[in-house]
Image (cartoon, coloured by chain):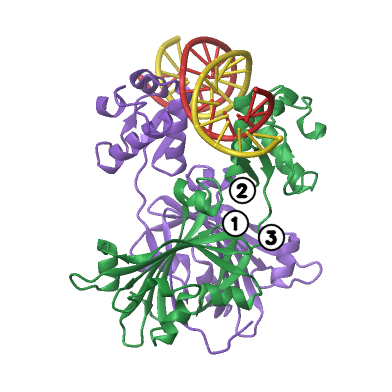
Chain colours: A purple, B green, C red, D yellow
Amino acid sequence: MDRIFHPGGFDATGAGPLYLQLQRRIAEAIATGRLSPGDSLPPERDMAALTGLSRVTVRKAVQTLVGSGQLVQRRGSGTFVAAPVERIEQALSLLTSFTEDMARRGKSVDSVWLNRALHVPSPAEVMALGLGAGTQVARLDRVRRSDGVPLAIERAALSADLLPTPESVVASLYSVLETRGLRPVRAVQRISAASIGARDAGLLGVAEGAAGLQIERLGYLPSGRVVEFTRSLYRGDAYDFTVELKLAPEGAGD
Amino acid sequence: MDRIFHPGGFDATGAGPLYLQLQRRIAEAIATGRLSPGDSLPPERDMAALTGLSRVTVRKAVQTLVGSGQLVQRRGSGTFVAAPVERIEQALSLLTSFTEDMARRGKSVDSVWLNRALHVPSPAEVMALGLGAGTQVARLDRVRRSDGVPLAIERAALSADLLPTPESVVASLYSVLETRGLRPVRAVQRISAASIGARDAGLLGVAEGAAGLQIERLGYLPSGRVVEFTRSLYRGDAYDFTVELKLAPEGAGD
DNA sequence: GAGTGGTCTAGACCACTAG
DNA sequence: TAGTGGTCTAGACCACTCC
Protein backbone atom coordinates (compact mmCIF):
# COMPACT_ATOMS: atom_id res chain seq x y z
CA MET A 1 0.00 0.00 0.00
CA ASP A 2 2.92 2.31 0.82
CA ARG A 3 4.29 1.52 -2.62
CA ILE A 4 1.19 2.88 -4.28
CA PHE A 5 1.00 6.05 -2.26
CA HIS A 6 4.63 6.86 -1.46
CA PRO A 7 5.34 10.49 -2.27
CA GLY A 8 8.44 9.75 -4.35
CA GLY A 9 8.30 9.61 -8.10
CA PHE A 10 5.72 12.28 -8.54
CA ASP A 11 6.26 15.35 -10.60
CA ALA A 12 8.89 13.85 -12.88
CA THR A 13 8.82 16.12 -15.87
CA GLY A 14 7.00 14.64 -18.80
CA ALA A 15 4.96 12.28 -16.65
CA GLY A 16 1.85 14.42 -17.03
CA PRO A 17 -0.46 15.93 -14.42
CA LEU A 18 -0.21 14.65 -10.87
CA TYR A 19 -3.76 13.29 -10.82
CA LEU A 20 -3.01 11.18 -13.88
CA GLN A 21 0.18 9.84 -12.30
CA LEU A 22 -1.71 8.79 -9.20
CA GLN A 23 -4.55 7.37 -11.29
CA ARG A 24 -2.04 5.28 -13.21
CA ARG A 25 -0.47 3.99 -10.01
CA ILE A 26 -3.79 2.84 -8.61
CA ALA A 27 -4.92 1.32 -11.92
CA GLU A 28 -1.67 -0.62 -12.14
CA ALA A 29 -2.04 -1.89 -8.60
CA ILE A 30 -5.47 -3.23 -9.53
CA ALA A 31 -4.27 -4.69 -12.83
CA THR A 32 -1.33 -6.47 -11.23
CA GLY A 33 -3.47 -7.78 -8.40
CA ARG A 34 -1.69 -5.86 -5.70
CA LEU A 35 -5.14 -4.50 -4.95
CA SER A 36 -7.85 -7.14 -5.09
CA PRO A 37 -11.60 -6.77 -5.54
CA GLY A 38 -13.18 -5.74 -2.27
CA ASP A 39 -9.98 -4.26 -0.90
CA SER A 40 -10.46 -0.84 0.59
CA LEU A 41 -8.28 2.12 -0.28
CA PRO A 42 -7.19 4.56 2.41
CA PRO A 43 -9.58 7.47 3.04
CA GLU A 44 -9.11 10.32 0.59
CA ARG A 45 -7.57 12.49 3.28
CA ASP A 46 -5.03 9.78 4.07
CA MET A 47 -4.19 9.26 0.41
CA ALA A 48 -3.57 12.97 0.17
CA ALA A 49 -1.29 12.93 3.21
CA LEU A 50 0.60 9.84 2.02
CA THR A 51 1.21 11.14 -1.48
CA GLY A 52 1.75 14.73 -0.49
CA LEU A 53 -0.99 15.82 -2.88
CA SER A 54 -4.10 17.80 -2.05
CA ARG A 55 -7.37 16.03 -1.46
CA VAL A 56 -8.87 17.66 -4.56
CA THR A 57 -6.14 16.14 -6.70
CA VAL A 58 -6.54 12.73 -5.10
CA ARG A 59 -10.28 12.95 -5.71
CA LYS A 60 -9.78 13.73 -9.37
CA ALA A 61 -7.60 10.64 -9.79
CA VAL A 62 -10.08 8.45 -7.92
CA GLN A 63 -13.12 9.87 -9.72
CA THR A 64 -11.89 8.72 -13.11
CA LEU A 65 -11.37 5.18 -11.83
CA VAL A 66 -14.84 5.25 -10.28
CA GLY A 67 -16.14 6.40 -13.65
CA SER A 68 -14.55 3.51 -15.46
CA GLY A 69 -15.93 1.06 -12.92
CA GLN A 70 -12.64 0.03 -11.35
CA LEU A 71 -13.39 1.57 -7.97
CA VAL A 72 -16.58 1.98 -5.96
CA GLN A 73 -17.19 4.71 -3.44
CA ARG A 74 -19.71 4.61 -0.63
CA ARG A 75 -20.33 7.78 1.29
CA GLY A 76 -19.61 7.41 4.93
CA SER A 77 -17.97 4.09 4.29
CA GLY A 78 -14.98 4.25 2.01
CA THR A 79 -13.42 3.57 -1.36
CA PHE A 80 -13.15 -0.01 -2.58
CA VAL A 81 -11.80 -1.98 -5.50
CA ALA A 82 -14.81 -3.00 -7.59
CA ALA A 83 -15.69 -6.60 -8.27
CA PRO A 84 -14.82 -7.45 -11.85
CA VAL A 85 -17.88 -8.07 -13.97
CA GLU A 86 -17.91 -11.16 -16.10
CA ARG A 87 -18.64 -10.13 -19.64
CA ILE A 88 -21.60 -11.84 -21.19
CA GLU A 89 -21.83 -12.51 -24.90
CA GLN A 90 -25.12 -12.68 -26.66
CA ALA A 91 -25.82 -13.51 -30.29
CA LEU A 92 -27.71 -10.63 -31.75
CA SER A 93 -29.12 -12.46 -34.74
CA LEU A 94 -31.60 -14.54 -32.79
CA LEU A 95 -34.69 -13.27 -31.11
CA THR A 96 -34.27 -14.56 -27.61
CA SER A 97 -35.69 -13.77 -24.26
CA PHE A 98 -33.35 -12.43 -21.60
CA THR A 99 -34.66 -14.90 -19.05
CA GLU A 100 -34.39 -17.89 -21.34
CA ASP A 101 -31.03 -16.79 -22.62
CA MET A 102 -29.52 -16.61 -19.17
CA ALA A 103 -31.13 -19.85 -18.10
CA ARG A 104 -29.33 -21.59 -20.99
CA ARG A 105 -26.08 -20.22 -19.60
CA GLY A 106 -26.83 -21.60 -16.18
CA LYS A 107 -27.09 -18.18 -14.62
CA SER A 108 -29.66 -17.31 -12.04
CA VAL A 109 -31.79 -14.39 -13.12
CA ASP A 110 -34.06 -12.11 -11.24
CA SER A 111 -35.70 -8.79 -11.79
CA VAL A 112 -36.37 -5.82 -9.60
CA TRP A 113 -39.64 -4.38 -10.79
CA LEU A 114 -39.74 -0.65 -11.21
CA ASN A 115 -43.18 -0.55 -12.72
CA ARG A 116 -45.71 -3.18 -13.81
CA ALA A 117 -49.10 -1.61 -14.50
CA LEU A 118 -51.42 -0.05 -17.06
CA HIS A 119 -50.82 3.59 -17.98
CA VAL A 120 -51.90 6.28 -20.36
CA PRO A 121 -49.43 5.89 -23.23
CA SER A 122 -46.74 8.41 -24.06
CA PRO A 123 -46.70 9.81 -27.61
CA ALA A 124 -43.69 7.60 -28.43
CA GLU A 125 -45.62 4.54 -27.28
CA VAL A 126 -48.69 5.48 -29.31
CA MET A 127 -46.51 5.80 -32.39
CA ALA A 128 -44.48 2.65 -31.88
CA LEU A 129 -47.38 0.39 -30.93
CA GLY A 130 -49.93 1.96 -33.25
CA LEU A 131 -52.37 2.50 -30.41
CA GLY A 132 -55.92 3.69 -30.98
CA ALA A 133 -57.43 6.56 -29.04
CA GLY A 134 -58.19 5.69 -25.44
CA THR A 135 -56.15 2.50 -25.47
CA GLN A 136 -53.98 1.97 -22.43
CA VAL A 137 -50.47 0.61 -22.39
CA ALA A 138 -48.96 -2.05 -20.16
CA ARG A 139 -45.57 -0.98 -18.89
CA LEU A 140 -43.05 -3.50 -17.62
CA ASP A 141 -40.01 -1.69 -16.30
CA ARG A 142 -37.40 -3.63 -14.44
CA VAL A 143 -33.76 -4.00 -13.58
CA ARG A 144 -32.45 -7.29 -14.91
CA ARG A 145 -29.96 -9.03 -12.69
CA SER A 146 -27.86 -12.14 -13.05
CA ASP A 147 -26.39 -13.73 -9.96
CA GLY A 148 -27.41 -10.60 -8.11
CA VAL A 149 -25.47 -8.23 -10.35
CA PRO A 150 -27.55 -5.64 -12.24
CA LEU A 151 -26.96 -6.06 -15.97
CA ALA A 152 -29.61 -3.98 -17.68
CA ILE A 153 -32.66 -1.81 -17.32
CA GLU A 154 -35.52 -2.92 -19.52
CA ARG A 155 -38.60 -0.83 -20.18
CA ALA A 156 -41.17 -2.77 -22.20
CA ALA A 157 -44.48 -1.40 -23.43
CA LEU A 158 -47.36 -3.43 -24.87
CA SER A 159 -50.86 -2.53 -25.88
CA ALA A 160 -53.29 -3.25 -23.04
CA ASP A 161 -55.32 -5.23 -25.60
CA LEU A 162 -52.58 -7.81 -25.74
CA LEU A 163 -51.57 -7.79 -22.08
CA PRO A 164 -54.46 -6.56 -19.92
CA THR A 165 -52.89 -7.96 -16.76
CA PRO A 166 -49.27 -6.87 -16.55
CA GLU A 167 -48.98 -8.36 -13.07
CA SER A 168 -49.19 -11.79 -14.68
CA VAL A 169 -45.64 -11.36 -15.90
CA VAL A 170 -43.39 -12.73 -13.20
CA ALA A 171 -40.19 -13.71 -14.96
CA SER A 172 -40.11 -14.05 -18.75
CA LEU A 173 -42.37 -11.74 -20.73
CA TYR A 174 -41.91 -13.89 -23.82
CA SER A 175 -43.10 -17.03 -22.07
CA VAL A 176 -46.28 -15.23 -20.98
CA LEU A 177 -46.81 -13.99 -24.52
CA GLU A 178 -46.21 -17.50 -25.83
CA THR A 179 -49.08 -18.95 -23.79
CA ARG A 180 -51.32 -16.36 -25.42
CA GLY A 181 -50.01 -17.05 -28.91
CA LEU A 182 -48.45 -13.60 -29.02
CA ARG A 183 -44.75 -14.29 -29.07
CA PRO A 184 -43.03 -12.09 -31.63
CA VAL A 185 -41.46 -13.88 -34.57
CA ARG A 186 -39.51 -10.93 -35.87
CA ALA A 187 -37.99 -7.84 -34.37
CA VAL A 188 -36.06 -4.78 -35.39
CA GLN A 189 -33.46 -3.37 -33.04
CA ARG A 190 -31.61 -0.12 -32.96
CA ILE A 191 -28.35 -0.16 -31.08
CA SER A 192 -26.33 2.77 -29.92
CA ALA A 193 -23.93 3.77 -27.19
CA ALA A 194 -24.68 6.43 -24.64
CA SER A 195 -23.50 7.71 -21.34
CA ILE A 196 -25.57 6.43 -18.47
CA GLY A 197 -27.42 9.16 -16.60
CA ALA A 198 -27.50 9.64 -12.87
CA ARG A 199 -30.78 7.82 -12.25
CA ASP A 200 -30.02 4.79 -14.40
CA ALA A 201 -26.46 4.66 -13.09
CA GLY A 202 -27.85 4.27 -9.60
CA LEU A 203 -30.08 1.42 -10.72
CA LEU A 204 -27.25 -0.38 -12.49
CA GLY A 205 -24.69 0.25 -9.81
CA VAL A 206 -22.27 2.03 -12.10
CA ALA A 207 -20.88 5.54 -12.05
CA GLU A 208 -22.79 8.33 -13.72
CA GLY A 209 -21.43 8.87 -17.21
CA ALA A 210 -20.28 5.27 -17.70
CA ALA A 211 -20.80 3.82 -21.17
CA GLY A 212 -23.95 1.83 -21.86
CA LEU A 213 -25.49 0.00 -24.78
CA GLN A 214 -28.88 1.40 -25.63
CA ILE A 215 -31.21 -0.95 -27.48
CA GLU A 216 -34.63 -0.12 -28.82
CA ARG A 217 -36.65 -3.06 -30.05
CA LEU A 218 -39.92 -3.47 -31.90
CA GLY A 219 -41.27 -7.04 -31.83
CA TYR A 220 -43.72 -8.14 -34.54
CA LEU A 221 -46.39 -10.82 -34.77
CA PRO A 222 -46.66 -12.90 -37.96
CA SER A 223 -49.53 -10.60 -38.94
CA GLY A 224 -47.17 -7.64 -38.94
CA ARG A 225 -48.67 -6.07 -35.82
CA VAL A 226 -46.25 -4.67 -33.27
CA VAL A 227 -46.43 -6.57 -29.98
CA GLU A 228 -43.74 -5.00 -27.87
CA PHE A 229 -41.80 -1.78 -27.79
CA THR A 230 -38.82 -2.21 -25.53
CA ARG A 231 -36.08 0.19 -24.59
CA SER A 232 -33.16 -1.36 -22.78
CA LEU A 233 -29.96 -0.05 -21.35
CA TYR A 234 -27.15 -2.54 -20.86
CA ARG A 235 -24.03 -1.98 -18.83
CA GLY A 236 -21.20 -1.46 -21.29
CA ASP A 237 -18.79 -3.33 -19.07
CA ALA A 238 -20.92 -6.42 -18.79
CA TYR A 239 -22.36 -7.10 -22.20
CA ASP A 240 -21.09 -8.04 -25.64
CA PHE A 241 -23.34 -8.59 -28.60
CA THR A 242 -22.22 -10.65 -31.55
CA VAL A 243 -23.61 -10.52 -35.05
CA GLU A 244 -23.00 -12.52 -38.14
CA LEU A 245 -23.08 -10.50 -41.33
CA LYS A 246 -23.84 -11.61 -44.83
CA LEU A 247 -22.65 -10.25 -48.13
CA ALA A 248 -24.68 -7.28 -49.27
CA PRO A 249 -26.70 -8.15 -52.37
CA GLU A 250 -25.37 -6.59 -55.56
CA GLY A 251 -26.78 -3.16 -56.14
CA ALA A 252 -28.65 -3.15 -52.86
CA GLY A 253 -29.12 0.54 -52.36
CA ASP A 254 -31.52 2.22 -50.02
CA MET B 1 -27.00 35.30 -21.43
CA ASP B 2 -27.69 37.16 -18.18
CA ARG B 3 -30.67 34.90 -17.70
CA ILE B 4 -28.51 31.83 -17.71
CA PHE B 5 -25.90 33.17 -15.34
CA HIS B 6 -27.82 35.51 -13.07
CA PRO B 7 -26.98 34.78 -9.46
CA GLY B 8 -30.61 34.52 -8.32
CA GLY B 9 -32.34 31.19 -7.96
CA PHE B 10 -29.35 29.28 -6.77
CA ASP B 11 -29.21 27.44 -3.53
CA ALA B 12 -32.96 26.87 -3.24
CA THR B 13 -33.21 23.97 -0.86
CA GLY B 14 -33.91 20.70 -2.57
CA ALA B 15 -32.51 21.86 -5.89
CA GLY B 16 -29.36 19.84 -5.38
CA PRO B 17 -25.71 20.84 -5.57
CA LEU B 18 -24.85 24.19 -7.11
CA TYR B 19 -22.85 22.68 -9.96
CA LEU B 20 -25.86 20.58 -10.98
CA GLN B 21 -28.12 23.61 -10.91
CA LEU B 22 -25.78 25.53 -13.19
CA GLN B 23 -25.32 22.50 -15.41
CA ARG B 24 -29.09 22.24 -15.76
CA ARG B 25 -29.41 25.93 -16.66
CA ILE B 26 -26.82 25.68 -19.42
CA ALA B 27 -28.26 22.42 -20.76
CA GLU B 28 -31.72 23.97 -20.90
CA ALA B 29 -30.40 27.03 -22.72
CA ILE B 30 -28.93 24.71 -25.35
CA ALA B 31 -32.04 22.57 -25.55
CA THR B 32 -34.35 25.55 -25.99
CA GLY B 33 -32.07 27.14 -28.56
CA ARG B 34 -31.21 30.16 -26.44
CA LEU B 35 -27.66 29.00 -26.97
CA SER B 36 -26.97 27.89 -30.53
CA PRO B 37 -24.20 25.66 -31.90
CA GLY B 38 -21.02 27.63 -32.24
CA ASP B 39 -22.04 30.21 -29.64
CA SER B 40 -19.34 30.90 -27.12
CA LEU B 41 -19.94 30.88 -23.41
CA PRO B 42 -18.33 33.47 -21.18
CA PRO B 43 -14.87 32.57 -19.86
CA GLU B 44 -14.98 30.37 -16.79
CA ARG B 45 -13.83 33.23 -14.59
CA ASP B 46 -16.66 35.41 -15.88
CA MET B 47 -19.25 32.68 -15.40
CA ALA B 48 -18.02 32.38 -11.83
CA ALA B 49 -18.32 36.12 -11.25
CA LEU B 50 -21.75 36.31 -12.89
CA THR B 51 -23.22 33.42 -10.94
CA GLY B 52 -21.44 34.17 -7.71
CA LEU B 53 -19.99 30.65 -7.68
CA SER B 54 -16.34 29.69 -7.52
CA ARG B 55 -14.50 28.81 -10.70
CA VAL B 56 -14.04 25.22 -9.51
CA THR B 57 -17.80 24.83 -9.21
CA VAL B 58 -18.40 26.38 -12.62
CA ARG B 59 -15.80 24.04 -14.08
CA LYS B 60 -17.50 21.02 -12.60
CA ALA B 61 -20.79 22.01 -14.23
CA VAL B 62 -19.14 22.68 -17.56
CA GLN B 63 -17.05 19.50 -17.47
CA THR B 64 -20.09 17.25 -17.39
CA LEU B 65 -21.56 18.99 -20.43
CA VAL B 66 -18.25 18.68 -22.23
CA GLY B 67 -18.30 15.01 -21.33
CA SER B 68 -21.72 14.50 -22.84
CA GLY B 69 -20.66 16.32 -25.99
CA GLN B 70 -22.86 19.37 -25.57
CA LEU B 71 -19.99 21.80 -25.10
CA VAL B 72 -16.51 21.95 -26.53
CA GLN B 73 -13.54 23.57 -24.82
CA ARG B 74 -10.42 24.80 -26.52
CA ARG B 75 -7.53 25.86 -24.35
CA GLY B 76 -6.54 29.40 -24.90
CA SER B 77 -9.66 29.98 -26.92
CA GLY B 78 -12.87 29.43 -25.01
CA THR B 79 -15.94 27.31 -24.37
CA PHE B 80 -18.43 26.76 -27.19
CA VAL B 81 -21.75 25.08 -27.82
CA ALA B 82 -20.98 21.93 -29.79
CA ALA B 83 -22.34 21.36 -33.26
CA PRO B 84 -25.06 18.77 -33.07
CA VAL B 85 -24.04 15.55 -34.77
CA GLU B 86 -26.47 14.07 -37.19
CA ARG B 87 -27.05 10.51 -36.14
CA ILE B 88 -26.33 7.98 -38.81
CA GLU B 89 -28.17 4.70 -39.00
CA GLN B 90 -26.58 1.64 -40.43
CA ALA B 91 -28.13 -1.75 -41.00
CA LEU B 92 -26.03 -4.27 -39.16
CA SER B 93 -27.24 -7.33 -41.02
CA LEU B 94 -25.45 -6.52 -44.26
CA LEU B 95 -21.76 -6.63 -44.79
CA THR B 96 -21.08 -3.21 -46.21
CA SER B 97 -18.09 -1.02 -46.63
CA PHE B 98 -17.99 2.25 -44.73
CA THR B 99 -16.99 4.18 -47.84
CA GLU B 100 -19.67 2.62 -50.03
CA ASP B 101 -22.27 2.94 -47.31
CA MET B 102 -21.72 6.65 -46.91
CA ALA B 103 -21.57 7.22 -50.66
CA ARG B 104 -25.06 5.72 -50.94
CA ARG B 105 -26.22 8.29 -48.43
CA GLY B 106 -24.73 11.12 -50.45
CA LYS B 107 -22.20 11.95 -47.76
CA SER B 108 -18.67 12.93 -48.55
CA VAL B 109 -16.20 10.65 -46.86
CA ASP B 110 -12.55 10.97 -46.18
CA SER B 111 -9.99 9.35 -43.98
CA VAL B 112 -7.10 10.61 -41.99
CA TRP B 113 -4.50 7.89 -42.11
CA LEU B 114 -2.85 7.06 -38.84
CA ASN B 115 -0.90 4.11 -40.19
CA ARG B 116 -0.74 2.29 -43.50
CA ALA B 117 2.21 -0.07 -43.66
CA LEU B 118 3.52 -3.57 -43.02
CA HIS B 119 4.38 -4.52 -39.46
CA VAL B 120 5.37 -7.41 -37.30
CA PRO B 121 2.02 -8.74 -36.09
CA SER B 122 0.82 -8.52 -32.52
CA PRO B 123 -0.18 -11.77 -30.79
CA ALA B 124 -3.84 -10.84 -31.19
CA GLU B 125 -3.34 -10.39 -34.92
CA VAL B 126 -1.53 -13.70 -35.28
CA MET B 127 -4.43 -15.41 -33.53
CA ALA B 128 -7.21 -13.68 -35.43
CA LEU B 129 -5.67 -13.93 -38.88
CA GLY B 130 -4.07 -17.32 -38.41
CA LEU B 131 -0.67 -16.03 -39.48
CA GLY B 132 2.29 -18.31 -40.02
CA ALA B 133 5.69 -17.64 -38.51
CA GLY B 134 7.48 -14.73 -40.11
CA THR B 135 4.42 -13.43 -41.92
CA GLN B 136 3.95 -9.71 -41.75
CA VAL B 137 0.69 -7.89 -41.29
CA ALA B 138 -0.71 -4.92 -43.20
CA ARG B 139 -2.16 -2.35 -40.84
CA LEU B 140 -4.65 0.21 -42.02
CA ASP B 141 -5.47 2.58 -39.19
CA ARG B 142 -7.49 5.64 -39.92
CA VAL B 143 -10.01 8.13 -38.63
CA ARG B 144 -13.17 7.95 -40.71
CA ARG B 145 -14.84 11.25 -41.36
CA SER B 146 -18.04 12.27 -43.05
CA ASP B 147 -18.49 15.84 -44.15
CA GLY B 148 -15.39 16.64 -42.17
CA VAL B 149 -16.75 15.30 -38.88
CA PRO B 150 -14.83 12.39 -37.32
CA LEU B 151 -17.16 9.42 -36.93
CA ALA B 152 -14.99 6.46 -36.14
CA ILE B 153 -11.51 5.11 -35.70
CA GLU B 154 -10.90 1.97 -37.72
CA ARG B 155 -7.91 -0.28 -37.26
CA ALA B 156 -7.82 -3.02 -39.88
CA ALA B 157 -5.25 -5.79 -40.09
CA LEU B 158 -4.72 -8.16 -43.01
CA SER B 159 -2.12 -10.78 -43.75
CA ALA B 160 0.66 -9.34 -45.91
CA ASP B 161 0.07 -12.29 -48.25
CA LEU B 162 -3.27 -10.84 -49.19
CA LEU B 163 -2.36 -7.17 -49.20
CA PRO B 164 1.39 -6.75 -49.77
CA THR B 165 1.01 -3.08 -50.68
CA PRO B 166 -1.09 -1.34 -48.04
CA GLU B 167 -0.42 2.03 -49.68
CA SER B 168 -2.64 0.90 -52.55
CA VAL B 169 -5.67 1.43 -50.33
CA VAL B 170 -6.76 5.00 -50.83
CA ALA B 171 -10.44 5.05 -49.95
CA SER B 172 -12.38 1.80 -49.70
CA LEU B 173 -10.51 -1.26 -48.48
CA TYR B 174 -13.30 -3.50 -49.73
CA SER B 175 -13.09 -2.16 -53.27
CA VAL B 176 -9.36 -2.88 -53.33
CA LEU B 177 -9.99 -6.38 -52.03
CA GLU B 178 -12.71 -6.86 -54.62
CA THR B 179 -10.30 -6.24 -57.52
CA ARG B 180 -8.15 -9.00 -56.09
CA GLY B 181 -11.07 -11.36 -55.61
CA LEU B 182 -10.63 -11.15 -51.84
CA ARG B 183 -13.77 -9.38 -50.69
CA PRO B 184 -15.18 -11.08 -47.61
CA VAL B 185 -18.57 -12.74 -48.03
CA ARG B 186 -19.23 -13.30 -44.37
CA ALA B 187 -18.20 -11.62 -41.15
CA VAL B 188 -18.68 -11.98 -37.44
CA GLN B 189 -18.88 -8.87 -35.30
CA ARG B 190 -18.68 -8.30 -31.60
CA ILE B 191 -20.30 -5.14 -30.38
CA SER B 192 -19.89 -3.52 -27.02
CA ALA B 193 -19.97 -0.12 -25.40
CA ALA B 194 -16.97 1.46 -23.77
CA SER B 195 -15.73 4.76 -22.54
CA ILE B 196 -13.45 6.45 -25.02
CA GLY B 197 -9.91 6.91 -23.74
CA ALA B 198 -7.89 10.10 -23.88
CA ARG B 199 -6.00 9.31 -27.08
CA ASP B 200 -9.00 8.12 -29.08
CA ALA B 201 -11.13 10.95 -27.73
CA GLY B 202 -8.67 13.41 -29.18
CA LEU B 203 -8.87 11.72 -32.57
CA LEU B 204 -12.66 11.70 -32.56
CA GLY B 205 -13.06 15.17 -31.18
CA VAL B 206 -15.08 14.08 -28.17
CA ALA B 207 -14.41 14.36 -24.48
CA GLU B 208 -12.44 11.70 -22.70
CA GLY B 209 -14.82 9.20 -21.12
CA ALA B 210 -17.61 9.73 -23.66
CA ALA B 211 -19.51 6.61 -24.71
CA GLY B 212 -18.40 4.77 -27.82
CA LEU B 213 -19.46 1.70 -29.74
CA GLN B 214 -16.64 -0.81 -29.99
CA ILE B 215 -16.86 -3.23 -32.89
CA GLU B 216 -14.51 -6.09 -33.59
CA ARG B 217 -14.95 -7.77 -36.95
CA LEU B 218 -13.55 -10.88 -38.58
CA GLY B 219 -14.21 -11.02 -42.34
CA TYR B 220 -14.13 -14.41 -44.09
CA LEU B 221 -13.51 -15.55 -47.67
CA PRO B 222 -15.76 -18.24 -49.17
CA SER B 223 -12.95 -20.69 -48.40
CA GLY B 224 -13.29 -19.93 -44.72
CA ARG B 225 -10.01 -18.08 -44.47
CA VAL B 226 -10.00 -14.86 -42.44
CA VAL B 227 -9.25 -11.85 -44.63
CA GLU B 228 -9.55 -8.93 -42.27
CA PHE B 229 -9.45 -8.34 -38.56
CA THR B 230 -10.85 -4.92 -37.85
CA ARG B 231 -11.32 -3.09 -34.59
CA SER B 232 -13.42 0.03 -34.81
CA LEU B 233 -14.54 2.63 -32.34
CA TYR B 234 -17.61 4.65 -33.28
CA ARG B 235 -18.74 7.82 -31.59
CA GLY B 236 -21.76 6.94 -29.50
CA ASP B 237 -23.44 10.22 -30.30
CA ALA B 238 -23.15 9.80 -34.04
CA TYR B 239 -23.97 6.23 -34.85
CA ASP B 240 -26.93 3.92 -34.63
CA PHE B 241 -26.88 0.33 -35.77
CA THR B 242 -30.05 -1.48 -36.66
CA VAL B 243 -30.56 -5.21 -36.71
CA GLU B 244 -33.40 -7.40 -37.76
CA LEU B 245 -33.88 -10.43 -35.59
CA LYS B 246 -35.43 -13.75 -36.44
CA LEU B 247 -37.23 -16.22 -34.25
CA ALA B 248 -34.87 -18.50 -32.42
CA PRO B 249 -35.22 -22.07 -33.69
CA GLU B 250 -37.03 -24.37 -31.28
CA GLY B 251 -34.69 -25.98 -28.83
CA ALA B 252 -31.71 -24.08 -30.13
CA GLY B 253 -29.66 -24.19 -27.00
CA ASP B 254 -25.94 -24.03 -26.65
C1' DG C 1 1.00 40.40 -24.01
C1' DA C 2 -3.62 39.50 -22.71
C1' DG C 3 -6.88 36.09 -22.17
C1' DT C 4 -8.23 31.27 -22.03
C1' DG C 5 -8.63 26.63 -20.21
C1' DG C 6 -5.77 23.02 -17.26
C1' DT C 7 -3.97 22.03 -12.95
C1' DC C 8 -3.18 22.41 -8.03
C1' DT C 9 -3.52 23.85 -3.12
C1' DA C 10 -5.34 24.43 1.88
C1' DG C 11 -9.10 24.64 4.30
C1' DA C 12 -14.03 24.40 5.26
C1' DC C 13 -18.79 22.58 6.01
C1' DC C 14 -22.37 19.08 5.05
C1' DA C 15 -24.66 14.36 4.67
C1' DC C 16 -24.25 9.92 5.36
C1' DT C 17 -22.51 5.42 7.64
C1' DA C 18 -20.88 2.90 11.18
C1' DG C 19 -19.94 1.24 15.82
C1' DT D 1 -19.74 10.34 17.86
C1' DA D 2 -16.11 9.75 14.72
C1' DG D 3 -14.96 8.95 10.16
C1' DT D 4 -16.13 8.91 5.35
C1' DG D 5 -17.21 10.80 0.84
C1' DG D 6 -19.68 15.11 -1.42
C1' DT D 7 -19.48 19.83 -2.13
C1' DC D 8 -17.58 24.43 -2.19
C1' DT D 9 -14.37 28.39 -1.84
C1' DA D 10 -10.41 31.82 -2.95
C1' DG D 11 -6.39 32.09 -4.88
C1' DA D 12 -2.42 30.61 -7.55
C1' DC D 13 0.61 29.19 -11.49
C1' DC D 14 1.16 27.04 -16.08
C1' DA D 15 0.43 26.13 -21.20
C1' DC D 16 -1.70 27.43 -24.92
C1' DT D 17 -4.10 30.62 -28.45
C1' DC D 18 -4.77 34.73 -30.60
C1' DC D 19 -3.63 39.23 -31.73
Q: For the C terminus of chain B, which image quadrant?
A: bottom left
Q: Position of residue B99 (x, y in %)?
A: 54, 74
Q: Is residue B215 left or right of residue B107?
A: left
Q: For the N terminus of chain B, which image quadrant?
A: top right
- Local SS, label 1: loop
The residue under the point 48% across, 81% down is: B175
- Local SS, label 2: loop
Q: Position of residue B23 (x, y in %)?
A: 67, 37
The residue under the point 34% across, 28% down is: A12
Report the amino acid beneath label 2.
Answer: Gly
Q: Position of residue B173 (x, y in %)?
A: 45, 75
* Label 2 Cα neighbours within 10 Å, binned few <14 / some 14-19 / many ≥20: many
Give the letter of the chain under mark 3. A
> Observer-nearest residue: A130 or A214?
A214
From the image, tell me which residue sits under label 3.
A118
From the image, tell me which residue sits under label 1.
B237
Residue B156 shows up from this direction: yes
From the image, tell me which residue sits under label 2.
B69
Q: Is residue A62 left or right of residue A185?
A: left
**In terms of image quadrants, where is residue A78?**
top left
In front of the other: label 2 or label 3? 2
Residue A37 shows up from this direction: no
The answer for how far apart the CA atoms under marks 2 and 3 are is 36 Å
In the image, which disc is placed on residue B113? none
